[in-house]
Image (cartoon, rainbow, N blue to C red):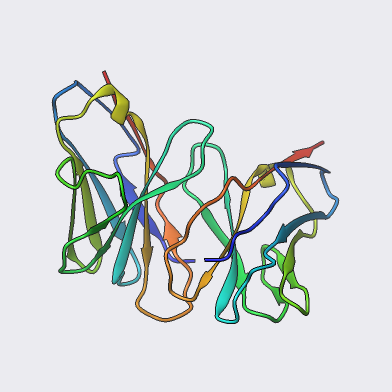
Amino acid sequence: DAKTTQPPSMDCAEGRAANLPCNHSTISGNEYVYWYRQIHSQGPQYIIHGLKNNETNEMASLIITEDRKSSTLILPHATLRDTAVYYCIVVPGYSTLTFGKGTMLLVSP
Amino acid sequence: GAVVSQHPSWVICKSGTSVKIECRSLDFQATTMFWYRQFPKQSLMLMATSNEGSKATYEQGVEKDKFLINHASLTLSTLTVTSAHPEDSSFYICSARAGDLNTEAFFGQGTRLTVV
């Protein structure tokens, strides 16, 4: 599975957009980019995933660069409840998810 | 999204006893279930993968005789921690995936195990 690199922590003001970057320069053609988040003392929550096209759902948008070597998760209007650890995971479809250290996003009033 | 229910949410047990944790997929059939363990301030570590009706595949360093996994149906998997010790105290999380290609995995809410 391709290795991912995420900043250890980020801050965001409530109501502003949170843009979480992820580098995956060794991604293979059959590997998807998945994003999950984990709020303290809870199980991870699925956010979004994509292969090469940008994706949007009710929670977030996923922007994947044309060369697929990096991606950005966008939470358009962050709330205090979005404070969590965000994990970017790159694996072939239907493969086991392996978690790195993720990015701790702190949303402040 | 699909719902995965884990029970119990927390449990305290004495050293030497066994504890069973259940993981159920409530609205889909999970051909594959995963068990993770998470120590404080660390990321999730995969313990084992199980497919319905077959033996679980354990990750290196995970004792299969200590962490018994049963995936008897498409909606239920259980993890039994046998002869628990204080060092087994951790946050145990299950995950379930349907059989389709390119589907996301859904996670239970986790079980906090404390061995005293």
Expressed as whole percent of the image width and height from the top left, the position of residue B15 reads: 19, 21
Residue at image position (71%, 59%) is A22
Residue located 43% across and 66% down the image: B2
The number of discs equals: 0
Give whichever of B94, A66 is nearer the camera.
A66
Q: In this view, does B101 lie to the left or right of B60?
A: right
How far across and down, in percent of the image, does residue B88 sit?
A: 29, 30
Name the image quarter holding residue A33: bottom right
| Residue nearer the viewer, B99 or B27 | B99
Q: In this image, A48 relative to A65: left or right?
A: left
Residue B72, horizontal then vertical, whole percent: 15, 63
Give the vertical position of A103 relative to B50 (above or below): above
Which residue of the protein is positioned furthest toward the top in this rendering?
Answer: B116
Residue at x-position 79% and y-position 60%: A76
Task: Judge whether A57 appears above or below A8 on screen.
Answer: below
**Left or right: residue A16 compared with residue A64:** right
Quadrant for residue A104, please give it: top right
The quadrant of the image that shows the C terminus of chain B is top left
Quarter of the rendering containing residue A75 = bottom right
Residue B12 sits above or below residue B18 on the image:
above
Which residue shows up at 31% across the image and 50% down it? Answer: B60
Q: Where is residue B110 in the image (x, y as percent from the top left)?
A: 39, 43
